[in-house]
């Protein structure tokens, strides 16, 4: 009887057994077979954008017709101030700011990291090697009687490869994470641009506000010097006591103290602009000249709250961080499964260099292998849980970023409109105080009132003027805050400057349009009285065309006049 032949298993059968074994062995993982197939042969979750709490509309959108749902002006919102100096500052800051450059290099680093992740998808180790050694064997040791050649040479060259197959998606998930991190770096760059442009505009507004405060304080000093002259003239004439002189000089000193205080703010705004421009601190006065506080347009285009999700860089950055962390979950889960690799070595070696290239000098190995981390005492699963917890943490951070963005826009809207309303009331107060001061000085000169009423009114006038100018600055800052919160401005990297951005279309309004220079009556001329000089108002310059502004430069810009304060309405009540 012929011996019974043992059945053999085909290669395809062995492959099926291997795959079935891997699936059974991998049953201890976190991803089901159905999910693994559905995810494109990858373990871990496929990413989906998390929900975000967002309002349907702005709070004031139904009550305030000035709040527009248009989005067209958000990209270059600073040009709505119609200020060529500000436009030049923004363009120069974009080109020269060092924080922007730093963020740009982070984008390049993220691109390089992505290329590394893509490279890991292919054979991770591919090396060529070669060498020559001359060896000598000892004949004095044991078992050396059969040594034929004590001295010999070895020539060797070859190639080795090690390739961990991406069966579970480790390297594809790493590419997914690298893509998301690259997006994070781009969104961070755009966020730097949004902050930069808003900071330039805010510093510029602070600079112009301080200029206006200094000019207004200087005018108030001139007016109060007249009051001091009146008090001194009456004191010399024996009509009043020295208390009036002391009181008038005290009020004058208080007003004079405003000037150095505002000069500090002016210098700090100047220094802030220098840093934003990426230049050493220097006096920008020859470049900036004098000008009014930037005036916000009547209508404010804010779009819809839902636009924040796709326009505001920090919101987009937070969302891409969630996407990157989602991929990290899949990378962590791959450690639960066996890592399958293919390794191979092709080698040529021989005793003589001439024999190195013969076929009988060839040697090599090739074959699959696997490595499975077992008995890890829960460390791998704990790492998966860690990545999932960080994923949930980033989702909460993303949703909080959306809420904060919505809040910041609403804060900017109410700050702008209520500051405008406040400025209207303060303007009425200033004009009324001017009339009261003028009447009180006349009565004091004629001996119908004491100086206390004049002092109180003059002090109140100065306080109201300071508040009014600050409020005008707040109006401009409120406009800046709205578009900072909306995430406008990063589009500057996508477009060249336009002519409308670099040139003004109409001359700015001056201080006298809203606050005419208050002329106080002079003391009556007498033997012991000397007339105080009447302050001269600086005529408004004629504005023809505003030259293009390029920074940094030492060329002076065209002045806009001493009277640098604007009013919300052309006609004072």
Image (cartoon, rainbow, N blue to C red):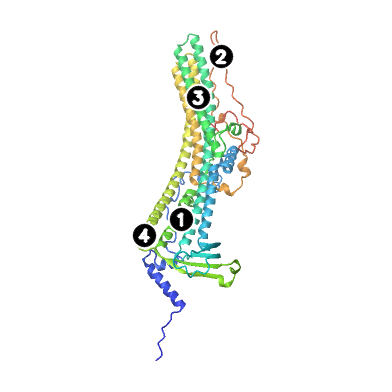
Spatial separation of the CA atoms under disc 3 and disc 2: 22 Å
* Marked residue nearer the N-terminal end (3 or 2): 3
Secondary structure found at label 2: loop
Q: Residue 18 is drawn in which quadrant?
A: bottom left
Disc 3: which residue: 434
Spatial separation of the CA atoms under disc 3 and disc 4: 77 Å
* CB under 8 Å between discs 3 and 1: no
Spatial separation of the CA atoms under disc 4 and disc 1: 19 Å
Q: Residue 359 is drawn in which quadrant?
A: bottom right
Disc 1: which residue: 324
Q: Is residue 42 visible?
A: yes
205 over 136 or under it: above or below? above
Tell me residue 527's x, y (percent).
55, 7
Of badges 3 and 4, the one in the foreground is 4
Disc 4: which residue: 381
Of residues 155 and 28, which is closer to you in this image? 155
* Marked residue nearer the N-terminal end (1 or 2): 1
Which mark is drawn over residue 299?
A: none
493 over 331 or under it: above or below? above
Of badges 4 and 1, the one in the foreground is 4
Spatial separation of the CA atoms under disc 2 and disc 4: 92 Å
Of badges 2 and 4, the one in the foreground is 4
Q: Residues within 10 Å of mark 4 (few under 14, many from 20)?
A: some
Disc 2: which residue: 531
Q: Residues within 10 Å of mark 3 (few under 14, many from 20)?
A: many
Of residues 568 and 470, which is closer to you in this image? 470
Spatial separation of the CA atoms under disc 3 and disc 1: 63 Å
Secondary structure found at label 3: helix
């Amino acid at each position: 009887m012929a011996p019974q032949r043992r059945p053999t298993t085909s290669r395809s059968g062995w492959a099926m057994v291997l795959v079935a074994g891997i699936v059974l062995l991998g049953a201890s993982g976190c991803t089901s077979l159905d999910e693994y197939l559905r995810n494109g042969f990858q373990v871990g979750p496929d990413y989906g954008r998390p929900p975000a709490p967002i309002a349907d509309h702005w709070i004031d959108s139904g009550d305030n017709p000035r709040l527009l749902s248009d989005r067209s002006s958000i990209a270059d919102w600073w040009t709505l101030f119609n200020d060529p100096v500000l436009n030049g500052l923004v363009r120069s800051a974009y080109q020269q700011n060092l924080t922007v450059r730093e963020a740009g290099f982070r984008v390049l680093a993220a691109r390089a990291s992505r290329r590394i992740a893509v490279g890991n998808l292919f054979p991770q180790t591919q090396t060529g090697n070669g060498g020559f050694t001359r060896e000598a064997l000892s004949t004095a040791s044991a078992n050396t009687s059969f040594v034929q050649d004590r001295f010999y040479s070895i020539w060797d060259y070859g190639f080795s490869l090690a390739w961990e197959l991406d069966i579970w998606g480790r390297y594809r998930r790493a590419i997914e994470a690298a893509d998301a991190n690259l997006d994070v770096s781009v969104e961070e760059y755009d966020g730097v641009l949004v902050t930069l442009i808003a900071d330039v505009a805010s510093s510029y507004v602070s600079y112009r506000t301080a200029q206006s405060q200094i000019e207004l304080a200087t005018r108030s000093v001139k007016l109060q010097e007249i009051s001091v002259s009146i008090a001194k003239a009456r004191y010399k004439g024996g009509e009043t006591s020295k208390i009036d002189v002391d009181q008038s000089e005290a009020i004058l000193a208080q007003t004079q103290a405003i000037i150095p205080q505002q000069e500090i703010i002016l210098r700090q705004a100047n220094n802030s602009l220098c840093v934003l421009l990426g230049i050493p601190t220097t006096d920008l006065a020859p470049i900036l000249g004098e000008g009014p506080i930037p005036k916000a347009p009547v209508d404010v285009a804010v779009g819809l709250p839902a636009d924040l999700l796709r326009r505001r860089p920090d919101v987009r950055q937070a969302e891409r961080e969630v996407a990157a962390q989602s991929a990290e979950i899949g990378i962590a889960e791959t450690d639960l499964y066996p890592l399958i690799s293919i390794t191979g070595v092709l080698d040529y070696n021989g005793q003589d260099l001439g024999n190195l290239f013969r076929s009988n000098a060839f040697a090599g190995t090739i074959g699959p292998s696997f490595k499975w981390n077992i008995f890890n005492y829960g460390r791998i699963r704990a790492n998966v849980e860690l990545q999932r917890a960080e994923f949930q943490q980033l989702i909460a951070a993303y949703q909080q970023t959306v809420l904060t963005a919505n809040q910041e826009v609403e804060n900017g809207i109410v700050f702008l409109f209520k500051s405008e309303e406040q400025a209207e009331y303060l303007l009425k107060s200033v004009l009324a105080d001017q009339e009261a001061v003028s009447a009180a000085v006349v009565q004091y000169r004629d001996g119908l009132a004491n100086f206390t009423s004049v002092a109180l009114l003059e002090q109140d006038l100065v306080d109201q003027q300071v508040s009014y100018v600050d409020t005008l600055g707040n109006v401009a800052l409120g406009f800046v805050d709205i578009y900072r919160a909306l995430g406008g401005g990063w589009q500057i990297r996508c477009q060249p400057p336009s002519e409308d951005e670099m040139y003004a279309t109409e001359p700015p309004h001056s201080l006298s349009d809203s606050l005419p220079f208050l002329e106080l009556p002079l003391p009556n001329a007498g033997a012991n009285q000397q007339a105080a000089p009447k302050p001269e108002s600086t005529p408004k310059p004629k504005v023809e065309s505003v030259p293009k502004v390029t920074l940094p430069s030492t060329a002076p810009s065209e002045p806009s006049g001493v009277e640098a304060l604007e009013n919300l309405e052309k006609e004072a009540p």
